[in-house]
Image (cartoon, rainbow, N blue to C red):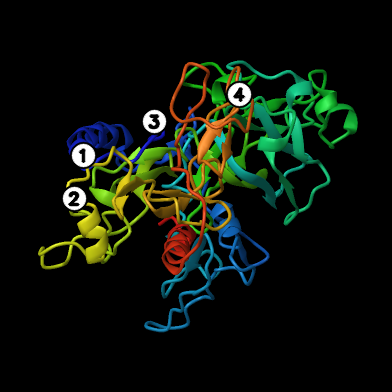
Amino acid sequence: MTPLARPPSLASLASLASLATIAAAALATPAAAAPLSQPSGARIPSPMGCAGNRPTGLAAELACVCDPAGPCNIGAPCPSPGNCAVPTGTCETTLYHQFNDNTCIPSQLAGLDPYDDGALTPETFTPTCPLTFRLVTRGTARFGNVFGWYNVTGQAPAPAALYPMLDCNAAAGAQVVLDVRSDPRWTGGEIGFFLVTPEQHGGSGQCAGGDCCARVDRLPAAGYAYYSQRALNPDHVGADSFIHLIVYDSQIRERTFYFAWEDTSGAANNDFTDLVTSVSGVECTGGGQACATGGAGLCQYGVTACRGAAVECQQVYQPAAEVCDGADNDCDGLTDERPDGTGTLCSDDVVGNCDGVTCAAGLVCRSGVCIDPCSHVDCPAGMACLTGVCLPGCNQCGGVACGAGTTCDLGSGDCLGGPGQDAGVDASGPGDDGRTAGCCQGGGGGSGPAAIGLGLGVALWLGRRRR
């Protein structure tokens, strides 16, 4: 969706509502996806097993991904009815026992469910922050696989266009940070993720030349590359293709996805723990863009975000008490009004001087002069002013992502640097040169408690967990 260039006037709210209705239909969350299965009919991932009196499998691995790092969320066996303990850590998955359970494998699961929450999409992603690549587990894989990113072009990338981030020697817990948006290798569009194996061609499960350490430079003579874009896989044969990757949307980390891989060509044990990685700082394609919620006032502003394989418009502000700031804080379609409807909250001087003054859309009257409501608002770093309040800045980790080839100028809130446009040149509106102006309304000048409080309000909203 195209970012809103200017906050709409009250007279245009009807058209905004119409836009929001269309957007809501496009962003509607579908019913929960059915569990995945291989072409053979085998449900994936496979159920948990037991090794060394500890449950194994993807659910058990995700139960050990916790914030902050701590014990795995796997409960002890239940000794008697009514004494079954449920772990309380903040982990992706929680496993616990019922009475008379298998003493090793819990029957109860809460949080991220590897069986019901997995999806084959999203396949491509938009970088919104510096990306953090983490290695969760290598399971029992024989191969030393490699994980990294590539630019989405519509075809399988050449080996030289695959950019490894976690090499064959990276151990569980390893992490690497890269700001893809500042990397000269990024072409400005969507990115995908890949797995490279060292498997011998024609020798299922065997390491090529006895070397089990995968490397991109060994392709294509030795090993295979598998992609988040399933149709690019070397063994893709249409709808009946073997599934190598299941994608999960984190429940405890913002803008984080897990990638659970099977690494053998045409055959696997289907536990999807051959390599499990996560990437933070990305949105699925369509996420991180300005959107209209259909509400009035501040409640109209939203940012698209991923929810599993779907995209929804998240409202940034909730209705609040009205204050004299030129914004409709309580989202009732009126600005700066008293609770009893008898007039304005603003001073008599301001009201008197503004009698008979009609301002253009996006401006408010103060002391008889039509001004930008952001002219006296100084927002915290990473945020920009919109209708007098601080919203996440364009292309920032908490907010709207600028389009390909453009970057956000937080001074103006504009996406700058499109075709034929030098970054840093102010833009007052959309033009034919590729600029997108006003994805966040510009503002500068002084500071005040209201601006700081509103900025903190958005920061707190953005800090909430996804579900």
Looking at the image, is 97 positioned above or below residue 301? below
Which mark, residue 13? 1
**Observer-nearest of 15 and 242:** 15
Q: Which residue is mark 2?
A: 333
Q: Nearer the viewer, mark 2 or mark 4?
A: 2
Labelled pair 1, 4 in contact (Cβ < 8 Å): no
In percent of the image, x 46 and y 38: which residue is there?
119
Point out the tag, 3 or 1, that comes first from the N-terminus: 3
Density class for disc 3 (Cα within 10 Å; few <14, some 14-19, many ≥20) is few
Looking at the image, is 90 positioned above or below residue 181? below
Q: Which residue is mark 4?
A: 152
Point out the tag, 3 or 2, that comes first from the N-terminus: 3
In percent of the image, x 23 and y 52: which residue is there?
354
**Disc 3 to disc 2, how far (Cα)?**
24 Å
**Observer-nearest of 75 and 424:** 424
Where does the N terminus fall, quadrant-wise? top left
In percent of the image, x 55 and y 25: which residue is there?
230
**x then y, percent, for residue 189:** 59, 26
**Disc 2 to disc 4, how far (Cα)?**
43 Å
Labelled pair 2, 1 in contact (Cβ < 8 Å): yes
Q: Amino acid at mark 2?
A: Gly
Labelled pair 2, 4 in contact (Cβ < 8 Å): no
In the figure, residue 454 lies in which quadrant?
bottom left
**x then y, percent, for residue 385:** 45, 50
Q: Is residue 261 visible?
A: yes
Where does the C terminus fall, quadrant-wise? bottom left
Q: Which residue is mark 3?
A: 1
**x then y, percent, for residue 323:** 29, 64
Q: Amino acid at mark 4?
A: Val
Kind of element beneath mark 4: loop
Q: Amino acid at mark 1?
A: Leu
**Disc 3 to disc 1, how far (Cα)?**
18 Å
